[in-house]
């Protein structure tokens, strides 16, 4: 349907089924239709499901059992505190526009949305309990599946102090929040018996950075007058590994340039001139990294293919064998023609000698019989010479055709050998790239495993997953670039081969044209021939 004022109701298990099998279609459906999700009928205890997964899909009405003050209900009430507590929130732009696609299970930043980084330091609490009990604080995040972090970040327990405990913990770092518009932070304060003393849900897009007092709510989300947490919140743009310096230079170019100038002045004050500084051989970031990568490309195996000319092909054994065979055929034909000419010449001379024997030379020229015999001999000789020439041209054209076939086969085999050599080079390059990428992946795993700043297994898993995603994107780009480069090299070699083939055909056609021209010239000339 495409009727915006119609609403469809789905039980939570049906909605989850759509999310599992047709997530993108479900999001697009919610761009044009109203949908309501309600608890399944088996929740006889009035428990609630997690509404966040349906908010991620753009469902407009996510119904809950309001009589149960559990975590899903706290998330619901905390989220809708914003916008004046009117009960309506505008969905993000990409969840409303028909020309945008959104996957609620995405692990990479959405187009047009900047991923965020959030750091929360729980410093202290005030009036958390009127009893002398130990307390601790949990900080969780709910949002997209990749952004959701639960039961990982918690402070140490401060014993026997519910009035003003000081935690002063290291900051809890939510390193990469893919979609800040849908993410919420949850602060939960518990006593030593794991009983909830107070909680607060804060949407990430409504947070303000800095030192903040966060007033707490009861389990049923009623305001508490005195209990609060004192925290330091830092909000930043997420910067992938390797781009920190670049981002710093973009954020404050003056400071970046002034820092470089300051270093240069300090070195000059120590008596070190700029001409004495060599940065070419340094392996590191910036321009040197680019230069080193270019040097690696230059060091990569570079094959120079020899130009295949007709002269080279004519020195091949297969071609020489054909030319020797053709020369024998030509010699045999020429001997046959010479023998036939000698025989005809002898016969004609004998006939003429018998005819003029004993006669006066002056009378011979006037005799009709002599003229008739000579005319017949001239015609016989002319026909024989014409036949010999045609046989010669036919044989030579046949030889040229055979030479063309032989040269074409030799050229094709040479081209195939060069292409095979190029493909072998490309295969070696891809193997080296795969080995290099595998090595980087192993080094990444070791780096994350040995990182002391990552305190929990969940942090290490997320960090490893993030690095793997970055590596995968980088590896895919490298492979795409390598395939494009290899394709260009193949096309370039193919064009070169095609030009060489055209040159070969041109030369063969010139040879055939030569014999055709000889035939045409002969047809245009007087065909009467005689021997002297």
Image: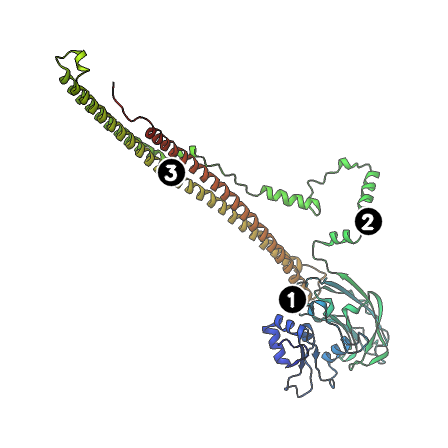
Q: Name the residue carrying label 1.
A: 101
N-term-proximal mark, 3 vs 1: 1
The image shows residue 223, relative to residue 339, as above or below, that is: below
Instruction: From the viewer's side, name the closer residue of 81 and 507.
Output: 507
The structure residue drawn at horizontal position 68% and vertical position 73%, both measured from the top left corner, is 58
Instruction: From the viewer's side, name the closer residue of 231 and 401.
Output: 401
- Specify few, some or many for label 1: CA neighbours under 10 Å numbering under 14, 14-19, or 20 or more: some
- Specify few, some or many for label 3: CA neighbours under 10 Å numbering under 14, 14-19, or 20 or more: some
Instruction: From the viewer's side, name the closer residue of 460 and 402.
Output: 402
Q: Are marks 3 and 2 in contact (CB under 8 Å)?
A: no
Residue 391 screen position, x and y as percent: 28, 32
- For this view, does 104 lie left or right of residue 319? right
Instruction: From the viewer's side, name the closer residue of 479 and 406.
Output: 406
Q: Are marks 3 and 1 in contact (CB under 8 Å)?
A: no
Residue 408 screen position, x and y as percent: 40, 40
- Specify few, some or many for label 2: CA neighbours under 10 Å numbering under 14, 14-19, or 20 or more: few
Frontmost of labels 1 and 2 is 1
Q: Name the residue carrying label 2.
A: 254
- For this view, does 523 lie left or right of residue 507? left
Tell me the element at label 2: helix
Tell me the element at label 1: loop
Residue 136 screen position, x and y as percent: 78, 74
Looking at the picture, the colour scheme in use is rainbow
Quadrant including the C terminus: top left
Q: Is residue 349 visible?
A: no
- For this view, does 428 lie left or right of residue 347? right
N-term-proximal mark, 1 vs 2: 1
| Number of the label disc, if any, that sits on residue 404 | 3
Frontmost of labels 3 and 1 is 3
């Amino acid at each position: 349907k495409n009727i915006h004022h119609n609403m469809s109701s789905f039980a939570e298990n049906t909605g989850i089924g759509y999310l599992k099998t047709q997530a993108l279609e479900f999001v697009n459906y919610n761009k044009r239709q109203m949908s309501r999700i309600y608890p399944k009928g088996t929740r006889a205890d009035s428990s609630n499901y997690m509404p966040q997964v349906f908010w991620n899909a753009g469902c407009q009405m996510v119904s809950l059992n309001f009589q149960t003050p559990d975590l899903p209900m706290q998330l619901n009430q905390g989220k809708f505190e914003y916008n004046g507590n009117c009960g309506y929130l505008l969905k993000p732009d990409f969840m409303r526009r028909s020309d945008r696609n959104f996957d609620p299970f995405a692990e990479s930043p959405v187009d047009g949305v900047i991923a965020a980084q959030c750091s929360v330091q729980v410093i202290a609490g005030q009036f958390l309990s009127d009893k002398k009990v130990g307390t601790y604080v949990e900080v969780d995040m709910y949002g997209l599946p990749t952004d959701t972090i639960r039961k990982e970040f918690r402070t140490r327990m401060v014993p026997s102090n519910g009035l003003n405990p000081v935690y002063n913990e290291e900051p809890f770092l939510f390193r990469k929040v893919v979609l800040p518009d849908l993410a919420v932070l949850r602060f939960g304060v518990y006593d030593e018996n794991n009983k909830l003393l107070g909680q607060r849900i804060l949407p990430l897009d409504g947070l303000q950075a800095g030192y903040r007092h966060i007033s707490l709510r009861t389990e049923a989300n009623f305001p508490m007058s005195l209990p609060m947490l004192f925290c330091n919140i830092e909000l930043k743009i997420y910067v992938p590994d390797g781009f920190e310096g670049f981002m710093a230079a973009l954020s404050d170019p003056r400071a970046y340039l002034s820092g470089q100038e300051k270093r240069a002045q300090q070195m000059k004050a120590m008596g070190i001139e700029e001409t004495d500084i060599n940065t070419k051989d340094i392996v590191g970031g910036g321009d040197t990294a680019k230069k080193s990568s270019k040097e690696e490309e230059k060091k990569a195996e570079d094959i120079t293919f020899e130009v295949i000319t007709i002269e080279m092909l004519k020195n091949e054994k297969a071609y020489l064998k054909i030319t020797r065979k053709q020369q024998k055929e030509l010699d045999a034909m020429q001997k046959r023609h010479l023998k036939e000419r000698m025989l005809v010449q002898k016969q004609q001379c004998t006939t003429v000698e018998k005819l003029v024997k004993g006669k006066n030379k002056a009378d011979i020229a006037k005799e009709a019989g002599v003229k008739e015999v000579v005319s017949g001999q001239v015609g016989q000789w002319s026909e024989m010479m014409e036949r010999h020439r045609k046989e010669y041209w036919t044989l030579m054209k046949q030889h040229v055709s055979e030479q063309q076939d032989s040269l074409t086969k030799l050229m094709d085999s040479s081209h195939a050998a060069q292409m095979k050599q190029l493909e072998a080079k490309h295969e070696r390059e891809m193997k080296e790239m795969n080995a290099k990428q595998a090595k980087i992946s192993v080094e990444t795993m070791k780096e994350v495993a040995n990182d002391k700043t990552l305190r929990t297994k969940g942090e290490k898993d997320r960090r490893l997953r993030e690095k793997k995603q970055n590596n995968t994107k980088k590896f895919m780009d490298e492979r795409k670039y390598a395939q494009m480069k290899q394709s260009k090299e193949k096309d370039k070699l193919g064009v070169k081969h095609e030009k060489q083939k055209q040159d070969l055909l041109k030369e063969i056609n010139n040879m055939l044209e030569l014999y055709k021209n000889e035939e045409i010239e002969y047809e245009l000339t007087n065909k009467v021939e005689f021997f002297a």
